Amino acid sequence: MAGEGSVLLDELRAAIGRYVVLPSEEALAAVTLWVAASHVQPALQHAPRLAVVGPTKGCGKSRVLDVLHETVHRPMMTVNTSPAVVFRVIGKNPPTLLVDEADTIFGPKAGEKEDLRGLLNAGHQRNRPAWRISGPEHKPTAFPTFAMAALAGIGDLPDTIMDRAVVLRMQKRKPGERITPFRSRYSVPELNALRDRLAAWLVPLRGVAAGLVPKMPVEDRAADTWEPLIIVADLAGGHWPAQARAACLAMTRNEVVQDEQTTLKTRLLRDIRRVFEQEGDREALRSQDLLAALVQDADAPWAEYGTKGLNAYHLANLLRDFGISPANHRFENGRQAKAYARNQFLDAWARYCPDPTQPSTPEHVSAPARPAKGKPPAPSSGALPVGPLGGTAGPKPAR
């Protein structure tokens, strides 16, 4: 049995690698194990998310979902699916949710998708139902949320998702990187055949999987997320147990580095806002003046950044993910220079380091009678009421 599973995972890994270029060999192994884990998810205690993120369009995110759709257990594409439908189809044998354009669910204009966002936050762990008033008699009803989910989108997803996910950081293919074109006529039958063989192998082992307590190379939430993948690797045997644990360590360490970079970028945004305030909130600051002010702050890390301190290249690179870049600007004295315009930072400041001196209006204070921007519309008759299950965390800073 162990030999059969190992060979089957090898075949699945090769098939996935033909259609998509993943960031690393560890990422390819992780996706392979995630697909296989979907076939034993009724026996699992945690439903790991697969976050397929990239900085731009054209990085292969949607192609990953195409391959997953043909290989996972009971795929359900949710890009245009009503949250009420998703709530009602999740049960003892839940589907595997595949969410494209996931960044639109967690953005400031999520609106009517708030219920789906809440489901994705809550469904990582078993026995976390969503209670809703439902039906003509308006009875409180518990809707299961436990289901594996793959989410593809531009930029990072919120912490509530990323911390519960195996993260694939996709990039555009290099000129020499080749893949097999995905064509339904021959690609789908090949992948479906692998899916059916996975099910034939793993479904009878659900009882065994439920009783396994694998030795994990990580702890806490990372262990919860990776345990289903390690379980499948241990069921397969061969080289997979060691390979799965190596992938777990490498990918979780990479996310620690990414978190450190995110914290640094948020600090940079705050420090730049302080410099603009000290300069009287001028329309723009020359790049060299902004850099000088940052480096001169003895309490900030910028004088020791890199090998010789923060420079113009470092600054532009750190701000790129926020859509901020220097441009030629003509100042009052008529001279032109590379500069950062203040209005470029306003959106990033509001999202990632809001000014604590400007609190929002408390709920009990009456506001002027006018349409509330960004407020979700009232649910239509018979629909599930809007309300996040997992809190109202906003989007995570782009990394």
Image (spheres, rainbow, N blue to C red):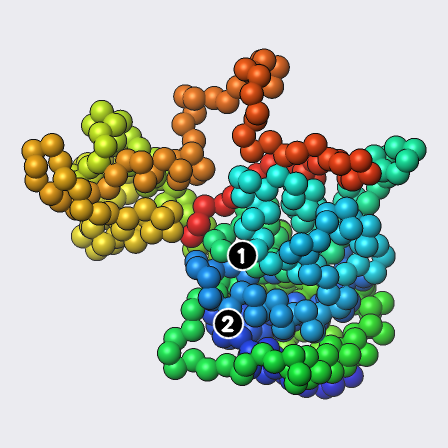
Relative depth, front residue between 14 and 185: 185
Q: What residue type is labelled 2?
A: Leu
Q: Which residue is drawn at 66% across and 41% down?
A: 112
Q: Residue at x 69, y 42 (%)?
A: 115
Q: Which mark is residue 350?
A: none
Q: Is residue 121 above or below residue 387?
A: below
Q: Residue at x 81, y 54 (%)?
A: 89
What x and y, as percent, mark residue 273?
A: 31, 33
SS category of the residue bearing label 1: strand
Q: Find the residue positioned furthest to the right.
A: 137
Relative depth, front residue between 121 and 218: 121
- The answer to which quarter of the image holds residue 235 is bottom right
Q: Residue at x 53, y 65 (%)?
A: 61
What x and y, as percent, mark residue 31?
A: 60, 70
Q: Disc 1 and disc 2: Cα gap in Å?
A: 15 Å
Relative depth, front residue between 357 and 102: 102
- The answer to which quarter of the image holds residue 339 is top left
Q: In this view, does 129 lie to the left or right of 111?
A: right
Q: What residue type is labelled 1?
A: Gly
Residue at which label 1 appears: 153
Residue at which label 2 appears: 22
